[in-house]
Amino acid sequence: MTDIGLALGGGGAKGLAHICMLEVIDEFGIKPSRIVGTSIGAIIGVMYASGISARSLREEIQNISNKENSSFIDAMGNVFTWLQLAGVNWKGGSLLKADAFLDDLMKYVKVKDFEELDIPVKVVAADFWRRNEVVLETGDIRTGVHASMAVPGVLEPVVVNGRVLVDGGVTNPVPYDLIMDECDMTIAIDVLGNRTESESLIPSFQESVFNSFQIMQKSIVRQKIAARPPDIYICPEIVDILMLEFYEASKVFAQAAPAADQLRRELERHLEEANRRP
């Protein structure tokens, strides 16, 4: 059996598209030998590696994305509307605490430490002061996921062993390079997506902050692909979904369907080639 590694990139709400890709992997009866994730990719990766099927993930995320069921999603949906009306002082370096979101998600993960997951997982964060990548794969899952998803200025950072950690997308948005030498086939899912020009051309405050962050991330990914591409690279065409629009799960799933078909075809081809090798 081909040893398959799966890399799930960051991208905020667009990262819900990862679930569609995991559904394809489940269709093939494949169990990845290892998973690496950044930000939303870390969250989805940990949930999947804990034993939750992709279909169950879709159901749970749709439930969480319902504003009536999630205090965090409700806060995300309203915070920037309020920001446009008032000046804000970023006390503590962030707008929101991660507790509500983590409570919503981690209740589905029945184990505490990375070592207890069904599939080994690495999550990527960044050391704010040392300005380098940090890979977490042991110890407390909640702490690791928090660090990987701590978007600077939006979600509070986390301190691990005296290091202030923030969202891993700052250094490695699609971290497939961390597992390439550990498996026979590497699948990388890039969910950074795209934005169409607004009629006014001038972006809103929210758009300026998050799209600028993702322009930087896209540049990092392009350089990595040029230097050493993964075996399978899938980039769902997720358009006009802002980073915090988790309540748009159904729209993300619909837009991700063509990319899921692409992954299905690519997997078939690569597995056939692997089976023909002596």
Image (tube, helix red, strand yellow):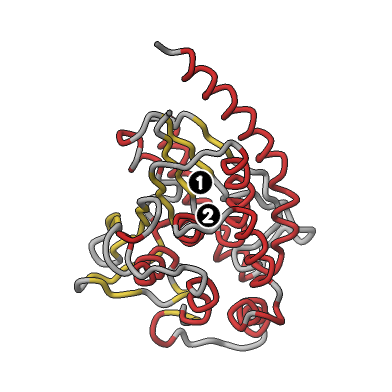
Instruction: Kindly indicate the quadrant of the structure image that contains residue 247.
Output: bottom right
Label 2 element class: helix
Quadrant containing the C terminus is: top left
Task: Give yes or no for contact between labels 2 and 1 (Cβ–Cβ under 8 Å).
Answer: yes
CA neighbours of label 2 inside 10 A, class few (<14), some (14 to 19), many (20+)? many
> Relative to the observer, which residue lies in front, 146 or 264?
264
Residue at point 43%, 53% (across, down): 37
Q: Is mark 1 on a helix, strand or loop?
A: helix
From the image, which quarter does the N terminus lie in?
top left
Give the crowd class for mark 1: few <14, some 14-19, many >=20 residues within 10 Å: some
Residue 111 pos. (x, y %): 39, 68
Q: In this view, does 268 lie above or below 177?
A: above
- Which percent across, then down, holds residue 261? 69, 35
Residue at image point 39% right, 51% down: 119
Q: Which residue is drawn at 57% across and 50% down?
A: 192
What residue sits right under mark 2 in the picture? 214
Percent of width and height locating residue 204 = 66, 68
Q: Is residue 12 above or below residue 226?
A: below
Relative placement, left or right, of 197 versus 19 is right
Residue linked to disc 1: 218
